[in-house]
C-alpha cells in the first residue's frame, strides 16, 4: 500500500529511502539556523534508438531584472546542460532566454520571448515522442510566486511571460497548469527539478492530486519532483568557490556530473534515485543555509536513474 511520509532530513538519511521501501515520499529539509538577444532556439526532440534518457532545461528571467541576475539564469541552464552532455545515454535540449534589456525587448520582443506557450509546446512534444521505457528530466530556472499571491489565486507558480496583460492568473503559470503539463510526460521515470522562489508550493499542489501519480511505483514506474525551496521563502544565490550561483543549481549540476554516485556509500558507476535525492538535498543545504529543498514522488529508491560514463 502506498504510504505518505513527511520527515526531517535526519530520517531521510535512514529509513525513508531504504532499499526495501517503495511508495510516496515527501521530505522537508530542515536546518537551524547571453549578454545580447538571440533568436528563439527551436527544440526538435528526436527519437533515437541509441538514447534512453532525455533532459529538457530552460530559464526565464524578467526584463526588469538586472543583467547580472539574468546572466546567472543563462549560466545555470548551461551548467546543468553541460554536466549531462558528456553522458552518451542522454539526448539534451535547452531553451535559453538570453539576457536582454528593457530597450532591446521593446525594439523587438518576439525573437527573445520564452513563454508558457513555448515551454508547454516542448513538453507536449516530449509527451508524444518519448517511449515508455525512457527516462526524462526537466530542469527549470525561473522566478516564482507564492501560493495565494493575490486573494483570487490560491496557487502560486512560475513566471514564464514578460507581457502578462489580460492573461489568466495574472500571467503566472500556476502550479495546477504546470503539473498537468509534466504529468503527461510518459516514460518509466520522470524527474522534475524546479528552481524558483516559493517552489515548495508545487509540492503542496501535488499533494492535492495524489491520485494522479501515487500508483506509479506500483506500476513499476517512477515520478520524482525536487524543488529548490519551501513554499514560503525565496531561493537566492550564494557564493560557492568564488562563484555566485544558486545552491540547488550547483547541486543538480554536480549530481549529474557523477558526484551523486555512491553518495554516503561506495561508487559503482550508477546513480540511484536514493543517491540523487540525498546528494541534492544535502549539498543544497550545505551551501545554502537558508535553502529548504523538498521532495515528493512515487518511486523505487534503488532504481538506477543513469550511469556515469567511464571516460566523460
Image: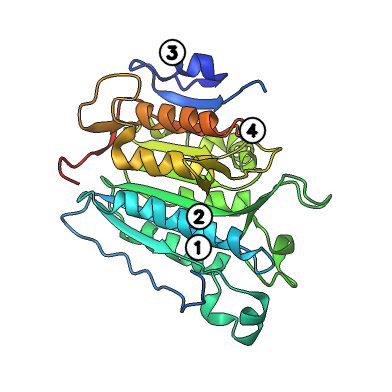
Q: Is residue 42 above or below residue 124?
A: below
**Disc 4 and disc 2: Cα gap in Å?**
30 Å
Q: Secondary structure at mark 2?
A: helix
CB under 8 Å between discs 1 and 3: no
Question: Which circle, 4 or 3, is nearer the viewer?
Answer: 4
Q: Which residue is mark 4?
A: 290
Q: Secondary structure at mark 3?
A: loop
| SS class, disc 4 | loop
Of mark 1 and mark 2, the one earlier in the sequence is 1
Q: Point out the residue furthest to the right here.
A: 151
Mark 1 packing: few (<14 Cα in 10 Å), some, or many (20+)?
some
Give above or below for 75 relative to 311.
below
Q: 52 above or below 221?
A: below
Q: Are marks 1 and 2 in contact (CB under 8 Å)?
A: yes
Q: Which residue is mark 2?
A: 181
Q: Residue at x 45, y 33 (%)?
A: 280
Amino acid at each position: 500500500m502506498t504510504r505518505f511520509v513527511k520527515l526531517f532530513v535526519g530520517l531521510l538519511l535512514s529509513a525513508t529511502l531504504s532499499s526495501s521501501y517503495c511508495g510516496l515520499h515527501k521530505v522537508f529539509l530542515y536546518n537551524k539556523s547571453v549578454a545580447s538577444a538571440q533568436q528563439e532556439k527551436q527544440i526538435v526532440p528526436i527519437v533515437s534508438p541509441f538514447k534512453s534518457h532525455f533532459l529538457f532545461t530552460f530559464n526565464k528571467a524578467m526584463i526588469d531584472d538586472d543583467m547580472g541576475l539574468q546572466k546567472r539564469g543563462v549560466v545555470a541552464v548551461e551548467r546543468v546542460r553541460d554536466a549531462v552532455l558528456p553522458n552518451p545515454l542522454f539526448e539534451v535540449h535547452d531553451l535559453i532566454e538570453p539576457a536582454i534589456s528593457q530597450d532591446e525587448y521593446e525594439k523587438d520582443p518576439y525573437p527573445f520571448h520564452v513563454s508558457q506557450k513555448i515551454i508547454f509546446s516542448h513538453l507536449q512534444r516530449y509527451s508524444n515522442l518519448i517511449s515508455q521505457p525512457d527516462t526524462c528530466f526537466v530542469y527549470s530556472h525561473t522566478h516564482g510566486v507564492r501560493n495565494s499571491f493575490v486573494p483570487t489565486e490560491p496557487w502560486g507558480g512560475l513566471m514564464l511571460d514578460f507581457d502578462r496583460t489580460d492573461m489568466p492568473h495574472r500571467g503566472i503559470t500556476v502550479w495546477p497548469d504546470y503539473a498537468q503539463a509534466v504529468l503527461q510526460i510518459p516514460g518509466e521515470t520522470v524527474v522534475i527539478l524546479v528552481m524558483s522562489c516559493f517552489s515548495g508550493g508545487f509540492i503542496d499542489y501535488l499533494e492535492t492530486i495524489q491520485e494522479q501519480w501515487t500508483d506509479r511505483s506500483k506500476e513499476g514506474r517512477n515520478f520524482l519532483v525536487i524543488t529548490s525551496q519551501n513554499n514560503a521563502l525565496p531561493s537566492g544565490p550564494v557564493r560557492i568557490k568564488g562563484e555566485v550561483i544558486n545552491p540547488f543549481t550547483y547541486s543538480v549540476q554536480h549530481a549529474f556530473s557523477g558526484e551523486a554516485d555512491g553518495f554516503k556509500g561506495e561508487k559503482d558507476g550508477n546513480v540511484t534515485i536514493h543517491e540523487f535525492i540525498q546528494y541534492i538535498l544535502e549539498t543544497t543545504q550545505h551551501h545554502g543555509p537558508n535553502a529548504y529543498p523538498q521532495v515528493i514522488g512515487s518511486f523505487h529508491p534503488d532504481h538506477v536513474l543513469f550511469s556515469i560514463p567511464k571516460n566523460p
